[in-house]
Structures are given as C-alpha cells and as structure tokens.
Amino acid sequence: MREEEESSSWFAHWEEQLPSPEELMPLSQTLITPDLAIAFDIPVAAAAAPPGANQNPGLSLHHPPASSRPPPHSDPESSDLNSASAAAGGDEPARTLKRPRLVWTPQLHKRFVDAVAHLGIKNAVPKTIMQLMSVDGLTRENVASHLQKYRLYLKRMQGLSGSGGGGGPISAADAATDQLFASTPVPHHFLSRGSVAGPEPFLSCMPVAALQHHQQITAAMQQQQQQYYHRRHLGHYGSPTGRGGFDHAFQNRAVSHSGMHQMVGLAAPPAMGFPPTTLVDDLEPAKRGGNGERKVLTLFPTGEE
DNA sequence: ACAATAATAT
DNA sequence: AATATTATTG
C-alpha cells in the first residue's frame, strides 16, 4: 500500500523536477535538430521566458518531409539559420508555423462522442463540438477532421447492420481502423438510420463560452514540452489486444524513465457537463515498422470519466 | 465572411 | 492509417 503513496506523490513534486528554462535552453540547442531550432526560433538571444510568461503564442513544429515548401519565391534561403531574418529574439515569431499532429486518444475521443451525443447529430458540428469539449488547443479543424472520419465509421456500421445478409465484408483494414472508435461506446441513436436524433434532454441550453482563452497559454506549454524532452520511445505496455481492447496505454505514469512528463493543470470553469481537459505531451501509441520519430500531442484526461 | 462538408494531400 | 489541408458549397 505504500505504493499508493508513491503513486500519488509522483506528481506532487513534478514542478520541482522541472529544470529552469534557462537550464534547458542550451540543452535544447544541442538536442533538437537544426530544423526545430529554426522553426522554434530558439531565443538564444532573447531573454528566456519564465514559466507563465511565454513570449509568444505561436505554435510550431517544422515538418520534416521537405515537401512543404510553400514559398512561391524560388528562394529557399535555407542557409541562413542563425539569423535574424527569421526572427530575432523576442519578437513576434513566425505565425506560419504548424502545430504537431493531434493524436486522438480514446479519452479524447470519448469526450468527442460525449459532446456529439449531447448535442445531437443535428447540432453536432465541428465548432459546437469543439466548444463543448472544451479541450484547450483543440481546433475546429481537428474536430472537423475527426468528425469526418467518425461519420464514415458510423456509416460503415449502419451499412452492415441493416443490410440483410452480410453483403459487406468488413475488411481487415477497417477493423484495425476502428480501434479507436471501438473503444468508445457509440450512443444508440447514432446508428439509427434515417433520422435525426434530437438533442439529449441533457444540457439543452448550456452557456458555452469563455473557454477559449487558455489556448495561448497551453499552446505555449505544448511548445515548451516539445522542446524539453526528446522522447524516442519508452516502450509500451498496452498489450496488443487483438481486438477492441484498448489496453490503456496511459499507465506511463508508472514509467520512471528519466522521463519528464509534465502535466499541465489548467483550472477552468466547469461550464458544462464535463470538466475541461488539457493537452499534454505523452507517450505515443506505439508504432510498428516504418514510423520514425513523430512529434505528436496526446491528450490526457484531467477528469475521470 | 464564416462554417460545414467533401476531397485530397502528407 | 491517421490527420491535416485545401477546395467547394451552403
């Protein structure tokens, strides 16, 4: 039982373990790739920003595959990385930087489904869903993209559920694809074909608002986290359950690799049914062959479900 | 001008 | 395969 104490204290002092920004700065330069250095515009010349006072809301992550070189001007000017042309210390950084891919964890998806369920298919549109989820850092496009896929999933389900006689063999690919979706119970009426489902008697008129102000803060934190630790792969514990069993890959809290996982606890007003959530950098789901290092963001549920 | 959806790209 | 991004439409 003493373990319980330890487990509860694993986060008690997480702050103390955090190195100062100044401490990390030099390290970052060493660890991060030149690309990242450019993208992040490491403020070598700029005063290090203390936690809580981020220099800028910009998120960035340079993408590796040099395929995205939008500049129509035929001048990559790639040779210049120290300079000032990009953004010298402390000033508004490039706003054209990309954020890392969002990873839809089962928890995050749960929130998504929850929101959709409460809104009703009718009103379940990206913007609204996003707001209801109140997950900072989550963008409308993130939701839209996921929603698109989710709809396909639902269609698929309907298709093989109503059709008589099993005409549509579910390809193996599909099964694998739906792992995420399978992890969350799909509200009955979702599958109801042919008609809409009104909004649940639940939160009918929820003053959804005032939730998007944390975005900048967390966004910055995400950025820092990305700079901070260089995680390759911690190994995974979730057993590859052959089927719909998402073995919570979230036990990483037990990992004692010198890992620096940080959790950002953001206090936010319990506007709607669910407590707000924050994005946190976590371990990656595991990859099989061929997937190099990919920086991603995952969501860690601050509240339980 | 904005938001949603569809289609396509990475 | 999973997301992002772009294009199209309402």
Image (cartoon, coloured by chain):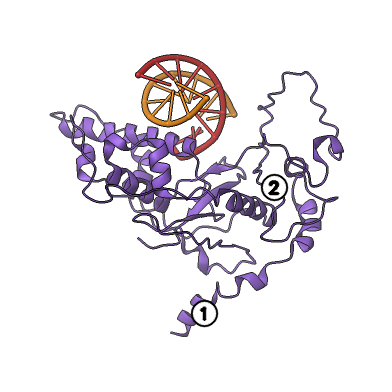
Chain colours: A purple, B orange, C red
Give me the residue at 38% from left, 42% from top: A129
Position of A123 with respect to A12 (left or right) is left
Position of A248 with respect to A213 (left or right) is left
Q: Which residue is mark 1?
A: A6
Disc 2 to disc 1: CB gap under 8 Å: no
Position of A92 with respect to A234 (left or right) is right
Total labels drawn:
2
Residue A124: horizontal and vertical position, in percent? 33, 38
The residue carrying pointer 2 sits among few (fewer than 14), some (14 to 19) or many (20 or more) residues within 10 Å by Cα, namely some
**Relative to A50, is A45 above or below?**
above
- Tag nearer the camera, 2 or 1: 2
Query: Which quadrant would residue A82 be assigned to in this image?
Result: top right
Give me the residue at 64% from left, 55% from top: A225
Question: Is any part of residue A172 visible from this angle?
Answer: no
Q: Which residue is mark 2?
A: A56
The amino acid sitting under disc 2 is Asn
Give me the residue at 30% from left, 43% from top: A119
Q: Are marks 2 and 1 on the same chain?
A: yes
The residue carrying pointer 1 sits among few (fewer than 14), some (14 to 19) or many (20 or more) residues within 10 Å by Cα, namely few
Question: Is any part of residue A101 visible from this angle?
Answer: yes
- Mark 1 falls within which chain? A
Which type of secondary structure does the marked residue at label 1 adopt?
Answer: helix
